[in-house]
């Protein structure tokens, strides 16, 4: 079983990976935004949509899963 | 053409190679057995790759004229290639097993699947369809638990029912058209509708999808790898072959691409959760087939190819975990990356292969989503995006995090056996090769594909955003414990409706028929029959007494006859002659009544 120390190390590692990943994603978006700036409005629109869609979809999915678990789950 | 020339004229049909090797191998010693299995799988792979597009392996017979074992065209080739690859990988994954039943059933099942996609006529198609159903039942039975036996019973029952629908459609189609040739169908006639239902059962179309989530998780770890590949994908092939452009498939596909995700996210059994994700991905393929353009059919075929790869990889990693730990639920598993690092790595590759750029799922799913965009189907597009993000969370993030990371719940276990690792490596390698060089996959698709821009930043970043923000939201939900906890229990699905309906149907008829039986028993068996029997017993004696009454005097013969009558009556045994006489008199009376 994991010790408290190893758990802390692991959580810190996870956090660093996540931060790195999201920073690189934001970096990509910004650089691409400038590369494609001649039609940036359309590109920006897509970026906004996909980011909000990603959040919204999982919120909806989580909400539905809670409802379904309440309604259809029998222990 | 004789049977020999039909089977061996162009080499042996790939389907029969697998079936024969699966059936013959169990009769040999351990090493020879393994050699036969591998020779069959490799020989099949080579045959599929080397045989050009053609109509071959034709067996002329008196029943349906021609049985065509090999109609290889651009559509069947894609499916045949991936079926052969995954048969080899599945065999490699299971080869450590001592159970001949497991591997032989797997090969016969794979042969059935290959036979379906290469069949050139309805008769051959139906035979391989049923071989597939039968062999896969043994794979489920190989789980060797009571649950797996129950699941196998339901599985075979549903597939025989589905097969009967298909057979009904085929018979009507053959009678009407006079041809066994597999042809495009519509839903406007009875034969098309029957065939549609038959294929829909195998494709796990909502609401007849419940067999899948009940049976696949109950199979052995190795059996589930085979199961994940053939039944649903051969049905997808048949839909693409016969029902391309059928609008109903779009609606069915959209329901499948969205609804099962909710179940996948709350299901506690890891393989049941993956089974729901499998239904979700088949939904994508059905939407593409329902659109029916050349581009969308390419998308369906490409996604079937990719999906077989990464779903098999997911089932392999899940199987390796179950094989090593004996545990199969999210509530019992966690933190396994410490003990099974290679399996964890392959699970991450499988998760990324679902939707991530540079992995196979991205290369194929993009075509389907683009096909939907091309048709300006906005609602369908949003639902598929939802399905894409959702399956990445359910089959990717939840599976990988829940089993390999998170809280450590398993004491200690070893890494998966080397053959399993090798099989996972092979499938991962193919997934990455297809993902990084999608033109390889596009070159074998049914219709000509223009080169697709998949890796330009403006294409990739929005897709990445969708997935990463979905992942971020999921992370927040997990961190703040906003999702329902993984607990043991049963999640009600559409099968609850028809299983309960079946129980009430049984109870109704049990009550109705048994009451009718009781009443009938009381009136006829216990009252009327003894009464009639009594009359029948006495009637011949009565007639004789009646005749003797008119005999004058009391001669010794008459007295003896009367005494005999008393004796017969007491023993209820009558001479044949008396009965015959009574019968003749009875018949004469009936005749006289009838003639009036």
Image: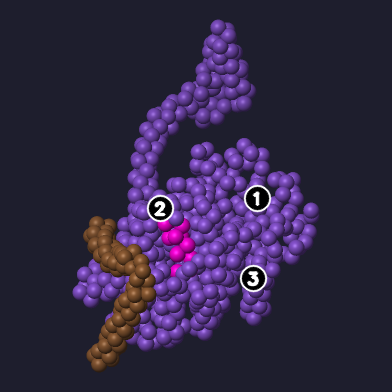
Chain colours: A brown, B purple
Res B148 seen here = no
First of labels 3, 2 by sequence position? 3
Labels 1, 2: front one: 2
Foreground residue, B267 or B142? B267
Q: Which residue is mark 2?
A: B376
Q: Image point 66% across, 69% down: which residue?
A: B49
First of labels 1, 2 by sequence position? 1
Q: Chain of mark 1?
A: B
Q: Which residue is mark 3?
A: B45
Q: Which residue is mark 1?
A: B121
Name the residue furthest bottom. A5
Left or right: B213 with respect to B298?
left
Residue B235: x percent and y percent?
Answer: 52, 56
Q: Is disc 1 surrounded by few (<14), some (14 to 19) or many (20+) residues within 10 Å?
A: many
Name the residue furthest front. A38
Q: Secondary structure at mark 1?
A: loop
Left or right: B96 with respect to A23?
right
Evaluate if marks 1 and 3 touch, with contact meaning CB atoms under 8 Å apart.
Answer: no
Quarter occupied by residue B88:
bottom right
Q: Which stretch is magenta?
A: B362-373
The answer for how far apart the CA atoms under marks 1 and 3 are is 23 Å
Q: Image point 69% across, 68% down: which residue?
A: B50
Residue B198: x percent and y percent?
Answer: 51, 49
First of labels 1, 3 by sequence position? 3
Q: Image point 47% across, 51% down: which residue?
A: B290
Position of the C terminus of chain B by quadrant: top right
Q: Secondary structure at mark 3?
A: helix
For the stretch drawn in magenta, what is the main secondary structure?
helix
């Amino acid at each position: 079983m994991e010790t408290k120390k190893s758990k802390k190390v692991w959580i810190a590692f996870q956090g660093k990976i996540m931060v790195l990943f999201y920073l690189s994603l934001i970096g990509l978006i910004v650089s691409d935004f400038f590369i494609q700036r001649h039609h940036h409005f359309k590109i920006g629109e897509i970026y906004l949509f996909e980011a909000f869609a990603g959040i919204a979809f999982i919120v909806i999915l989580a909400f539905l899963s809670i409802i379904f678990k309440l309604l259809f789950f029998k222990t | 053409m004789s049977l020999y020339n039909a089977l061996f004229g162009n080499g042996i049909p790939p389907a029969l190679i697998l079936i024969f090797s699966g059936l013959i191998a169990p009769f040999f010693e351990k090493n020879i057995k393994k050699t036969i299995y591998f020779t069959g799988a490799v020989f099949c792979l080579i045959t599929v790759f080397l045989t050009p597009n053609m109509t071959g392996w034709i067996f002329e017979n008196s029943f349906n004229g021609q049985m065509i074992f090999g109609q290889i065209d651009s559509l069947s080739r894609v499916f045949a290639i991936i079926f052969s690859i995954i048969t080899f990988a599945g065999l490699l994954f299971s080869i450590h097993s001592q159970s001949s039943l497991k591997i032989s059933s797997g090969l016969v099942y794979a042969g059935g699947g290959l036979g379906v996609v290469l069949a050139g006529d309805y008769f051959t198609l139906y035979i391989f369809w049923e071989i597939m159903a039968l062999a896969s039942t043994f794979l489920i039975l190989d789980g060797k638990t009571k649950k797996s036996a129950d699941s196998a019973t339901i599985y075979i029952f549903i597939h025989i029912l589905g097969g009967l629908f298909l057979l009904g459609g085929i018979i009507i189609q053959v009678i009407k058209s006079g041809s066994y040739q597999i042809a495009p169908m519509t839903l406007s006639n009875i034969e098309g509708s029957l065939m549609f239902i038959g294929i829909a059962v195998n494709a796990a179309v909502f609401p007849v999808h419940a067999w899948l989530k009940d049976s696949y998780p109950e199979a052995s770890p190795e059996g589930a790898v085979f199961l994940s590949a053939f039944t649903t994908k051969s049905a997808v092939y048949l839909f693409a072959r016969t029902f391309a452009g059928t609008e109903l498939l779009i609606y069915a596909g959209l329901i499948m691409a969205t609804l099962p995700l909710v179940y996948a996210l709350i299901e506690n059994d890891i393989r049941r959760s993956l089974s729901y994700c499998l239904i979700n991905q088949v939904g994508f393929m059905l939407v593409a087939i329902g659109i029916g353009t050349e581009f969308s059919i390419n998308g369906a075929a490409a996604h079937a190819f990719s999906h077989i790869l990464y779903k098999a990889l997911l089932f392999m990693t899940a199987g390796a975990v179950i094989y090593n730990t004996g545990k199969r639920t999210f509530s019992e598993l966690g933190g396994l990356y410490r003990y099974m690092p290679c399996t964890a790595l392959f699970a991450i590759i499988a998760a990324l292969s679902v939707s991530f750029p540079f992995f196979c799922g991205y290369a194929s799913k993009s075509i389907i989503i683009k096909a939907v965009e091309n048709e300006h189907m906005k609602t369908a597009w949003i639902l598929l995006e939802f399905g894409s993000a959702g399956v990445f969370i359910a089959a990717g993030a939840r599976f990988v995090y829940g089993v390999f990371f998170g809280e450590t719940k398993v004491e200690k276990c070893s890494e998966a056996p080397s053959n399993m690792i090798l099989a996972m490596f092979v499938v991962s390698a193919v997934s990455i090769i297809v993902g990084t060089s999608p033109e390889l996959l596009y070159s074998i698709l049914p219709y000509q594909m223009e080169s697709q821009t998949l890796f330009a930043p403006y294409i990739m970043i929005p897709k990445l955003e969708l997935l990463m923000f979905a992942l971020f939201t999921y992370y927040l939900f997990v961190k703040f414990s906003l999702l329902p906890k993984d607990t043991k229990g049963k999640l009600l699905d559409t099968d609850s409706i028809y299983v309960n309906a079946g129980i009430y149907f049984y109870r109704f008829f049990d009550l109705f028929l048994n009451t009718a039986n009781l009443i009938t028993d009381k009136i006829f068996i216990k009252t009327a029959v003894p009464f009639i029997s009594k009359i029948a017993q006495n009637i011949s004696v009565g007639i004789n007494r009646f005749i003797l009454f008119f005999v004058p005097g009391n001669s010794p013969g008459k007295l003896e006859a009367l005494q005999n009558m008393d004796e017969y009556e007491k023993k209820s045994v009558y001479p044949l002659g008396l009965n015959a006489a009574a019968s003749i008199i009875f018949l004469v009376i009936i005749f006289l009544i009838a003639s009036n």
